[in-house]
Amino acid sequence: MRIDVLGVEFDNLTLAEAVDRAQALAGGEGFHYVVTPNPEIVMTAQKDPAFQKVLSGADLVLPDGIGVIKAAAILGRPLKERVPGIDVAVALMGRMAGSGTRLFLLGAKPGVAEAAAEKLRAAYPGLQICGTHDGYFQDDAPVVEAIRAARAEVVFVCLGAPKQEFWMARNGPETGAKLMLGLGGVLDVFAGAVERAPERWQRMGLEWLYRLIREPSRIGRMARLPLFLVQAYRAKWGGKE
Ligand code: UDP
């Protein structure tokens, strides 16, 4: 059963459980997609019913970000743990390297996906990266065709939210891929363009602070986080959700 956190229903899974599920979807029949909403995405969905529908239509809805975990706890419906999209991607790549699953990298500025592919091939010997495409295109059709021609089974879709979620829902079935994951800025991290917070910061739930220090321009976006927790308290005390 999914857990509602301020309008978005999350799957209540540990990281390990989520990776098992994702791997099963990649090896199964038909098309599936995974979303990893953070508080910012949940707040966007509150104002956009079409986006909310795309999120709830996902096969896995995973809580990316400490804010979602805290809000769920405030609401009295705790989620097991934070399941960051990047951690799911890393664990999946370890498994895909062993199984020979074909992975396509879509998104980020021109050159970034290729650079990420090179680094990932070195990091995961045996990983089959069957194609890449940047995220700054006008027409979907050639990108769909590139994924299809590469016979990709899994696609990391890194176009930022809500673009990537709409893109997966709209185009995924046409590509022939089994599984797409909407992963925001991870290709920049894999390419080495953006550094991830040290593990200690991650464990303390302070990855957001580290990112803010490194990229102060994110302050406008992050200023919405306290508002998100206020919403959770209001829902709890006011009985309004
Ligand atoms: N991006 C893209 N196409 C676009 C807009 C954004 O490929 O039209 C990429 C952008 O280059 C970046 C990622 O999407 O690599 C979004 O990164 P951000 O850090 O904003 O995402 P978050 O992880 O915070 O959702």
Image (cartoon, helix red, strand yellow):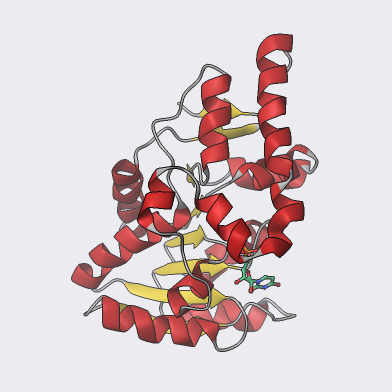
Q: Residue at x 44, y 59 (%)?
A: 86
Q: In this view, does 133 lie above or below 107?
A: below
Q: In this view, which residue lies farthest toward the front? A: 213
Q: Residue at x 66, y 24 (%)?
A: 232
Report the front residue among 29 and 192: 192
Q: Where's the N terminus, which quadrant?
A: top left
Judged left or right of residue 101, residue 35 is: right
User: Can residue 129 be seen here?
Assistant: no
Residue 125, x across and y down, in percent: 22, 80
User: Can residue 200 be seen here?
Assistant: yes
Residue 63, x across and y down, in percent: 50, 41
Residue 173, x across and y down, in percent: 54, 63
Q: Residue at x 34, y 62 (%)?
A: 90
Report the front residue among 140 and 116: 116
Report the front residue among 84 and 144: 84
Residue 62, x across and y down, in percent: 48, 43
Q: Where's the C terminus, which quadrant?
A: top right
Q: Quadrant for ligand 1? A: bottom right
Q: Which residue is drawn at 42% across and 45% down?
A: 83
Number of numbered labels in the structure image:
0
Q: In this view, which residue lies farthest toward the left? A: 98
Q: In this view, does 183 lie above or below 235?
A: below
Judged left or right of residue 149, residue 143 is: right
- Choose top left, top right, bottom left or bottom right for residue 182: bottom right
